[in-house]
Amino acid sequence: MEILYSNRFNKQFSKLSNEIKRDFEEKESIFRLNIFDSRLKTHKLHGKFSDLYSFSINYRYRIVFDYTNNGKDVRFHAIGTHDIYE
């Protein structure tokens, strides 16, 4: 599986603290092994985001993603607090 990163994601990621970036790297490693590992709390979103999924970095930060290339790859769209859903 390849992970693609949107421009929005890259911009948001660059503004995060080093601590959150380290937490992200740990969770991304878990994600690469098993997208639905219970430590990630991966879930499908609803409403206007019903084509997207989310997983948690910690209690405050999460990543929004979807599947690409007929489900073979994923694209990270956003990273941040619940504000990323706005």
Image (cartoon, rainbow, N blue to C red):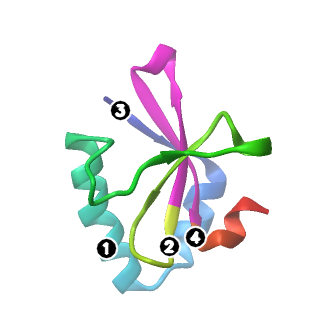
Q: Secondary structure at mark 4?
A: strand
What label does residue 61 carry, if any? 2
**Circle 4 is placed at which residue position?**
80
**Mark 1 and mark 2: span between their CA atoms?**
10 Å
**Circle 3 is placed at which residue position?**
2
**Circle 1 is placed at which residue position?**
23
Q: The residue under label 2 is which amino acid type?
A: Tyr
**Mark 4 and mark 3: span between their CA atoms?**
21 Å
**Mark 2 and mark 3: span between their CA atoms?**
22 Å
**Residue 54, x across and y down, in percent:** 52, 51
For discs 2 and 3, the disc positioned in front in the rendered view: 2
For discs 1 and 2, the disc positioned in front in the rendered view: 2
Q: The residue under label 1 is which amino acid type?
A: Asp
Q: The residue under label 3 is which amino acid type?
A: Glu
Of pointers 2 and 3, the one earlier in the residue sequence:
3
Mark 3 Cα shell of 10 Å, populated few (<14), some (14-19), many (≥20):
few
Q: Are marks 1 and 2 in contact (CB under 8 Å)?
A: yes
Q: The residue under label 4 is which amino acid type?
A: Gly
Of pointers 1 and 2, the one earlier in the residue sequence:
1
